[in-house]
Amino acid sequence: MEWHLKTFDQLTTVELYKILQARVDVFVVEQECAYRELDDHDQTAFHLFAACGEEIAGYARILPPGSTYHELSIGRVLVRKTYRGKGLATELIKRALKFVQENTKVNCVKIQAQEYLLSFYRSFGFEPVSEVYLDAGIPHVDMVLQVPD
């Protein structure tokens, strides 16, 4: 497994294609959710991904403050089905938070978590800040994490 963290401009066309393919495969096809996957936020994001050969095994994007929320946010977090249950999601979030802590001056990270993952995100210190709501037909909760100095 090789880990990469790149800006949009640093991604190769093959990497971008594989990332978008993984996001569509998980969020649109697997979760049977029709929504606008290409949302014009990728260009300002950092793209963190684990590659196994040519395949994207895990992915998350880190968006600067003011993109989707007032706060910095981590989103589009995914692990492909064949790589689940091996600790990849935990490693992905740890690496994303380490990047945020070491490379930004933000003190708060906001996420939009699928409800069934509340305990997973709580294990990193995220706390709910909203009631459960439906986004594209899937129950979600907004959560924040106060980043230590």
Image (cartoon, grey):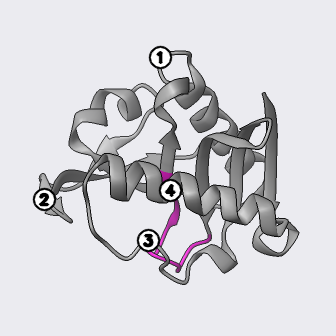
**Pointer 3 residue:** 37
**Pointer 4 residue:** 23
The mark nearer the N terminus, 4 or 2, is 4
Is the C-beta separation of discs 3 and 4 under 8 Å? yes
Is the C-beta separation of discs 1 and 3 under 8 Å? no
- Of residues 53 and 137, which is closer to you in this image? 53
Determine crowd level at label 1: few under 14, some 14-19, many 20+ residues with C-alpha closer than 10 A.
few
105 with respect to 66 (left or right) = right
Amino acid carrying mark 4 in the image:
Arg
Between the residue at mark 2 and the residue at mark 1, the CA separation in whole angstroms equals 27 Å
Residue 83 position by quadrant: top right
**Quadrant location, the N terminus:** top right
**Pointer 1 residue:** 85
Please state the horizontal and vertical placement of residue 42, each as a whole percent of the image.
62, 74
- Of residues 65 and 68, which is closer to you in this image? 68
Element on which disc 4 rests: helix
The mark nearer the N terminus, 2 or 1, is 1
Write the residue at 69% across / 37% down: 95
- Of residues 86 and 31, which is closer to you in this image? 31
Please state the horizontal and vertical placement of residue 112, each as a whole percent of the image.
34, 56
* Magenta residues, start to end: 64-76
